[in-house]
Structures are given as structure tokens and as C-alpha cells.
Image (cartoon, rainbow, N blue to C red):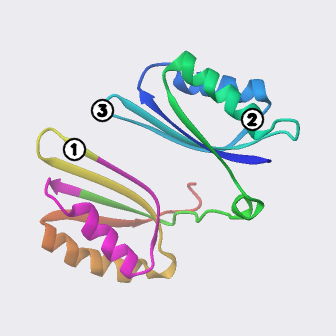
Amino acid sequence: MSHALLSISGRDRAGIVRDVAEAMLHLEANIEDSSMTALRGRFTMMLIVRLPRKVSLVDLNAALAELEQRSGLTIQAQPLSEDEVAVEGLEPDCVITVHGGDRMGIVYEVSRVLAEHDVSIVDLSTQLRGRDVYLMVLEAHAGAKVDTLRRALAAASEKLGVDIEVHRLDTDVL
């Protein structure tokens, strides 16, 4: 096995990223891609790591079991095929922001519009502020469909009673 996907979750505290990175360092595993967030006192992280040839799935699982015991985290590891490793993820070319009163169906309606226009969500974050203000930020890959997407999301905005804006990412800034 050369690559693995790790899914890590647990009660949030300072030092989790350091603990995970230290365990990977001891295995001589390279963290190639990662994403993490903390939600209401819970931590979650996904990593794609490249393992040296000398490290087997058994070795990886043993190191992760020790990390689970020491840290109280829950960790799952999945080997990745060469085909999965070779896939290059889509780069976002627009950011979509949603802001307004909280109500059921916001994520569904926005994601439905994106799916209907064959727009891929690269990253999604939502947050309830206070008791009734809902915020959502999506990074998406829309290609040439940004103007069409703006019109479709304007209809969704009206239907939901929230503000939705689409901003094209400037690749020079990234």
C-alpha cells in the first residue's frame, strides 16, 4: 500500500493536529492532502497520506490504534488504489455565499441547483449564528457556467428568502 485515507474525529482540544502529524512523522508518512474543522466542540479531519514501502496496513493500523488510545480520537484508515491516488481533484473557480434566516432545506435547494447545472462542490461549510442566522460558503467548480448559475441561484434565493451571491475566483490571487 502506498496511500491511505484517514478519517479522524473526537472531542476538540488543542494539539490534535500535532498529535496526528507526529504519528505520521514516526511512520515516515507524508501528509499530501488534508482538511479539518471543529464543530460545536467536536473535531474532524481527513488526510491522504503517502506511506513508505516498508510500512504496511498492519503497521499503520497499529500506530493509529496507539494514537486512538493516547488521544481519545476515533480513527479509520482506508487504503487507496493507484487509480484513486492518480485522480486530481477539481480546483474551485467560484465561491458561493448564502446568508439569511435559518430554515430547513437551504443546503438541499442550493446543492440541487448546483447538481442540475453539473457544478461540483469542492468545499462546503455551514454555520448557524445565534439562533436564526444561517451562513453557508461553498467553493465550487462551475467552469463556464457561472453566469447561468447566478441566474438559477437568484431564483433559489427568492424561493428560500436568503441572500445568495456567486463570486468567480481570481486565479492570480490564489
- Residue at point 80%, 31% (across, down): 28
Q: Is residue 112 magenta?
A: yes
Q: Earlier in the sequence, mark 2 or mark 1?
A: 2
On residue 58, the disc is 2
- Looking at the image, residue 76 sits to the left or right of residue 100; the answer is right
Mark 2: give few (<14), some (14-19) or many (20+) Cα within 10 Å: few
Mark 3: give few (<14), some (14-19) or many (20+) Cα within 10 Å: few
Type of amino acid under label 3 = Arg
Residue, disc 3: 40
Please, is residue 33 above or below residue 154 in the view? Answer: above
Residue 167: x, y in percent?
39, 65
Whole-angstrom CA distance, mark 3 to mark 1, is 11 Å
Residue 69: x, y in percent?
56, 19
* SS at circle 1: strand
For the residue pair 55 and 87, the one nearer the viewer reads as 55
Residue, disc 1: 128
The segment highlighted magenta reads 99-126
- Residue at point 82%, 35% (across, down): 55
* SS at circle 2: helix
